[in-house]
Image (spheres, rainbow, N blue to C red):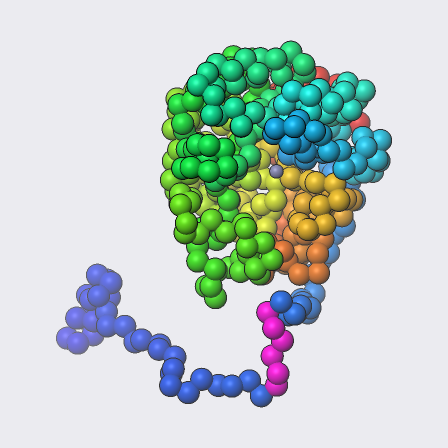
Amino acid sequence: MEFSRRHWLTSLGLAPLVACRPRRERQARPSIPMPRLDEFQPRSTLVVPTTRVERPRFPVVDVHTHLTWSNDRTEELQIPMPPEEVLQVMNRKGIRMMINLTGGHGKALEKAIATFQKPYPDRFLVFTEPTYHWIVEPDYPKRQADAIERAHKAGARGLKILKYLGLGLRERVDSGPLVKVDDKRFDLMWEAAGALGMPVAIHTSDPVAFFQPIDRFNERIEELAMHPDWSFHGRDFPSDDELQQARLRVIARHPKTTFILLHVAKAEDLGFVSRILETYPNTYVEFGARINELGRQPRTARKFFERFQDRILFGTDAVPHGVEYPQQIFCDQLYEIYYRFLETEDEYFDYAPAEKPPQGRWKIYGLGLPESILRKVYYENAARLFGLDLKLFRD
Ligand SMILES: [Zn+2]
């Protein structure tokens, strides 16, 4: 009788649980001095296959790079590495083409195009950016849309939106309330980009942990301790969800404009990203600086790549000489890690060329993608999106 009652309760999920509460009253004290978290560098004793992938299986288009930076007001352009030097890494690592997203606007854009795209049209493409400080002008919508048209004439191939929109730009540029991602003043700009066939590469929000309190439960606490200005917790910042929803309203309002959601839109929640890709055919995703997230959920990520193999673009977020962010330093090793992640089934390896994992204390697992998907992700999807000649990708 007792047995059958228990059995019946269990089938309803109502069986009494035995709680395993740790005893709190006497916490064991370590008998040796413990290293501080920032000094902790455990060396794995795991013995598993280690594959070095020096060259990608197919030629690569890196759609997310920052080869130039510029000032929104002065339009001065910084070129941290000349194209000839960038090309050496590209040639060694099988990178056919790089897209420089931060080409700026006006004079800066012209210089970025003259330095990279004009002399090497088969190797570099340049995107433009909005002129944010014009936001205070009453004719901003039209003025910005016209600027996009001029940028297109000058050779810009797309429009880049930094997370600055949503988390930085304010009504009086540096002061006042934050301007929302779906502010109607940008509608003409999104429409212009769509009409001109310029994809919009948009970075909205940031890692979820950057919106959480900086405390012992925060899985990115080391990174936030190094860069406290990366925290968007508190003050007048919107939540990650508010930012994501605002971007979705923009995508829904402009179905003829193609949006590349940078950093996998929200790499911590591929279910959410899947629903975006299903709902909005005008979206792609790119995975720069997020293999730390994808590689810690390799089974979910692999299914995601299988399902959305036509909508995923290769990107790294590479920055020449970006020593502060090891996960983004433009160098041979960075690309080898990306290739290893995509191509092999190696287990438990570093996602960045750094002594300590810089974006969360964990390691990653390779996806072991088949050739048919690798080809799409490495170059075919980008070639289709940017109308590139497939001849460029014959080895
Ligand atoms: Zn970036």
Q: Residue at x 57, y 16 (%)?
A: 147
Depth check: 216 or 260 in front? 216
Q: Is residue 289 above or below residue 213?
A: above
Report x, y in % for residue 18: 30, 76
Judged by its main secondary structure, the magenta piece is loop
Q: Is residue 360 visible?
A: no
Q: Is residue 163 above or below residue 47?
A: above
In front here: 124 or 363?
124
288 and 347: which is toward the camera: 288
Residue depicted at x 45% and y 84%: 27
Q: Position of residue 77 (x, y in %)?
A: 71, 30
Q: Does 35 appear in magenta?
A: yes
Up/down of 132 relative to 147, above or below: below
Quadrant where the C terminus is found in the figure? top right
Which of the 4 image quarters holds residue 149? top right
| Magenta-drawn segment | 32-37
Quarter of the picture containing the N terminus is: bottom left
Residue 1 appearing in the image: yes
Left or right: where 295 falls relative to 391: left
Task: Name the quadrant where ligand 1 sits.
Answer: top right
